[in-house]
Image: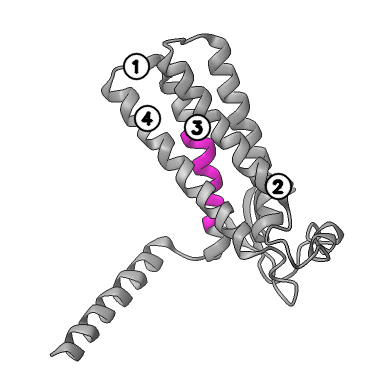
Amino acid sequence: MLTDENEEDVALFDAEEDAGQRLSKKTNIKHPVACFFHLFFRISAILVYLLCERLGNGSIGGMVAIILLLSCDFWTVKNISGRLMVALRWWNQVDEDGQSHWVFESRKGPRKKPSSDSEARIFWLGLIVCPLVWVVFAFSTLFQFNIKWLPVVLMGLVLQGANLYGYVRCKVGGKTDFKNMATNYFGRQFLKQTLSKAEES
């Protein structure tokens, strides 16, 4: 069951972010540590994978290092950088009846935008590009019949894809139907093209 609790401010969005807002206006990045670790674990996992793959070292140590980096990335992005950099968060909770509920939240109200545009660009760029890299890795392991790396690549794809899915749901709203959203987008694009052709005629 999906729920959306976007109506009220979240308890986690409080003093530590207000302190970030009081930083000097000269800096575009208000949470440099969060930005660093948002990209560090993701890029490190990709680099370790490429080094192990290129060197032909299919050791267990390399695979474990990649999985640890991916796990640290998942936790950091889900619990820290998303909340600080774009004021979004998501999680799953189980109620007293044992029902699982997905919760997608975004900050509302006058304190809606604690982060800078630079932080938002860094967040979304890292969140979108890295899962695409793991998709490329997945196809390359399948086409090269390099099956020993397939579980590691699938782990990267699942963990980073889960964060991407969760934050996209937070951004567009927890109850938004993606099929309707895509239909509306393509409808608007078709209308724009039709109007621009009509104006040219």
Looking at the rendering, which quadrant does residue 179 occupy?
bottom left
Which residue is identified by label 2? 34
Q: Residue at x 41, y 14 (%)?
A: 148
Label 4 to label 1: alpha-carbon separation: 10 Å
Residue 91 relative to residue 50: left or right: right
Which residue is identified by label 1? 146
Badge 3: residue crowd in 10 Å (few <14, some 14–19, many ≥20): many
Which residue is identified by label 4? 138
State the image coordinates of residue 189 (x, y, percent, origin top left). 29, 74
Residue 14 in the magenta stretch? The answer is: no
Residue 90 got which mark? none
Span colored in magenta: 157-168
Q: Residue at x 55, y 29 (%)?
A: 45
Label 2 to label 3: alpha-carbon separation: 20 Å
Label 4 to label 3: alpha-carbon separation: 9 Å
Of callouts 2 and 3, the N-terminal one: 2
Q: Residue at x 36, y 65 (%)?
A: 182
Q: Could you say whether the residue bearing mark 2 is in a helix, strand or loop?
A: helix
Q: Residue at x 60, y 60 (%)?
A: 118
Q: Is residue 72 visible?
A: yes
Label 1 to label 3: alpha-carbon separation: 16 Å
Which residue is identified by label 3? 156
